[in-house]
Image (spheres, coloured by chain):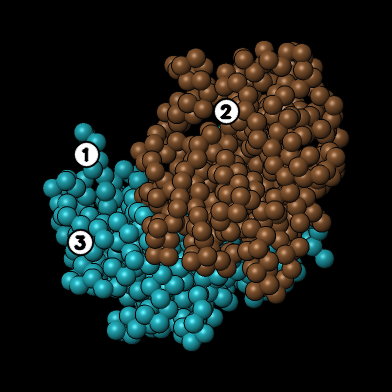
Amino acid sequence: MVYILGGFQTDFARNWTKEGKHISAMIREAVDGCLAATGVAPQQIDVGHVGNFAAELYAMQGHLGAFLVDVDPAFSGLPTGRHEAACASGSIALLAASAEIEAGRYDCALVVGVEQMKTVSPAIGGDYLGTAAWYELEAKGVEFPFPKLFGKLGDEYDRRYGLKDEHLAHIAAVNYGNAKRNPRAQTRTWYMSEAHACETSKYNSVIGGRIKISDCSQVTDGAVAVILASEKFAHSYAKQRGTKVEELAKIEGWGHRTAPLRFDDKVAESANDPYVLPHTRRAILDAFKRAGIADCWALSGIETHDCFTTSEYMAIDHFGLTAPGQSWRAIEEKVIDFDGKLPINPSGGLIGAGHPVGATGVRQLLDASLQVTGRAGNYQVPDARRFATLNIGGSGTTSCVFIVGR
Amino acid sequence: MVKPIRNVVVLGANGAMGSGSGAVFAAAGIPTVFLARTREKAEAGRERAESMVKSNAISRFITTGTYEEDLERAVAAADLVFEAVAEDLETKRTFFSRVDRARKLDAIIATVSSGLSIAAMCAGQSESFQRHFLGIHFFNPPTVIVGCELIAHAGTDPAVTAYVRELLAGTLGREVIETADTPAFAGNRVGFKVLNEVAQLAEEHGVAFMDQLVGPHSGRAMPPLVTVDFVGWDVHKAIVDNLYANTKDEAHEAFKLPAYMQRGIDAGRLGNKTKAGFFKKDESKNVMVLDPTRDEYRLVAEVAAPLPAFVEQMKAAIHVGRYERAMDAFCTAEGKEADLLRRVVLGYISYGLGRVGEVVQHARDIDRIMGFGFNWAPPSVLADAIGTRRTITLLEQAKLAVPRVLVEAAEKNTHLFNEPEVDRGRFFFAA
């Protein structure tokens, strides 16, 4: 069993380029904050993993694992590495770290997710994000390829089951509304309403296909660090703090699947499947099985990948809140709202809290662990005991799921 | 009892503060009436509000009207009247008299004034008006800057103050700092002390030099004299004149408007709004800088001097997130440039934290208004990064007042800045 001792998220509203900062400053602040939040001494860290999508493009910097060594003299010689799977990079780093702990190699792992995205204009950034798709075939020469790809996801739902934009608008409004409770959410001071999300205007223009500005997650600078620990480490950690290991968050299950990179190939493959993205569904079911839970109703909440409103629409039926194609029911019945039966993204998600690509998976796991230990502050879901995360790289390509419980 | 705010009237809704504040109310879904001298101006305010929150959707909560035709009717229905007319006591009093005659007896009246006496503004109105009157000082633009000051005067009903505090912090998502009804309240008192001191020093050391020396690396998003150009020299003068006339403390001389600034104002140089202040652009868009001794502009490129080595060290350290190391370079650097920067920054720490007990209750109030209103490093963040004991030593060496809260933190060996939800790193700039 792998335990989550805690962590730290930088304020996702910050613009580190405007602050004149290098990506290493983001890593430093996240790690310093994580050590302070958990009370773990740097000498106790055995290994470091960094999740990051494209620092080579955004910041002309690779080899991010090595920046961990720079944070504290005690990290001298620390084994480190960097992991990439587009927007799922953070979860891949977490999977690697937890596998090492389960294999008994290490007892205490530091996992950092980081992305600095405001170094370039939105158009150039959109092009960089295109490398998370099959660039030559799907993104080259295309302005903002990803909104168009996730617009196609909405179109596929529409074709198979019917899809109303007002349901997508509700997803946007819920995420922005939740973000207002989260002191580290990028959009916490922004204006949003369902009425605004429904209208198409100069302030809410179409980005691609059926995707408007209000349907999109944000361009975000952010870093998140968490500490994962073995059962042995967690026991002594809890004892030192006068608490019980049962009070700590732990990873109860995980799922990890990869679909074909090209969006059209995914859709062709799933033509006869009730689920539009069956590999994502399998990752969720794998995680449920490993956690020993029957279905989504064993969860107190979900932190899902809502890079666009259509991806959250997909997550709703893929998690099993409704039958395939009927996500709109959960939206109309307000199941996913903050005070709903199964709240989705109490943090605000990628739309409200922000989406620093390589950090998102780690942010989701941190939020899940805060929820199940009652430390999520103003966005705490009452009595939360078990949360799921779903982190997706590309157009539904790499799907990573964690079940976090206490 | 104070009843919920269901209807707001904004007076002066065409101006920057009026339209911006109106946007904040409407964005919270509160029906808001934008009043101005003409309907066209009120409509322009509404459009500006839309552009500030980037949505047409807030307009379903906005109606517009004129003072002449709509004020009495609108005020009679209002739960909150928000005044944002010209920063002139007599103008405000004239409006307040009309509001007093038309208002419901339990309607709250707030002024957005950035520093006039709250008590003086409502003097002469009905006792009910005075009990329901207070200051809500938003900073420009209110849709972006969440820090705001809440100022009750001696006659404000505490229940009204408590209700408005909850409205601001809860419904409107503000960082609320309660201040005493003292000149310029908290943020402008501390902030304009620094801005005017730098303007004074610019006469001897040059505008470009001072702005570079006291630049972002010293804990602010925008250099000080660029800030004064942004604020407007006339507004700057109104604030420091008020402080010079009505405060008597260790910073008194720092509030004296430099003579060259008065000459500039007389000549119509008011900063960005007149396209000339400390800085302006020539026909080829080259940036030019004022020579305060000659009232002439020269190309910045001609007067630019290399940054002192210790400033480069500070910026390099901040760039990679080593804020303590940056402040160590600040503390240990030798030379007149370092002495000048320390004078300004240590003076800010001393004067800012020194207002605790007089203008605000707690150090965190000063810290939050400087952090969330000015986007400057809060004094406590700087003192923590320097080290509280070391800060005291430096203040003593500079013969600056040592604030009591600083001594207490040093004695307890604790940090002054304890805001777990705030990244202190966001206040250090290397840009």
Tag 3: amino acid: Ala
* Secondary structure at numbered mark 1: loop
Tell me the distance, in whole angstroms, between the alpha carbons under discs 2 and 1: 45 Å
Left or right of B265: which side holds B53?
A: right
State the hue of chain B. cyan
Q: Nearer the viewer, residue B420 or A129?
A: A129
Q: Which residue is mark 1?
A: B286
* Residue B293, above or below B29: below
- Quadrant of the drawing holding the N terminus of chain B: bottom right
* Residue B366, above or below A376: below
Tag 1: amino acid: Asn
**Residue drawn at x 65%, y 69% as measured from the top left:** A236
Residue A189 visible: no
Q: Are marks 1 and 3 in contact (CB under 8 Å)?
A: no
Q: Looking at the rendering, which quadrant does residue B203 occupy?
A: bottom left
Residue B309 badge: 3
Residue A394 badge: 2
View extreme (left): residue? B302
State the hue of chain A. brown
Residue B424 visible: yes
- Which dot, 3 or 2, sits closer to the camera? 2
**Residue drawn at x 72%, y 21% as measured from the top left:** A276
| Chain ID, mark 3 | B
For marks 1 and 3, the one nearer the N-term is 1
Q: Nearer the viewer, residue B225 or B32?
A: B225
Q: Are marks 1 and 3 on the same chain?
A: yes
Tag 2: amino acid: Gly
Q: Residues within 10 Å of mark 2 (few under 14, many from 20)?
A: many
View extreme (front): residue? A104
| Chain ID, mark 1 | B
Q: Nearer the viewer, residue B27 or A153?
A: A153
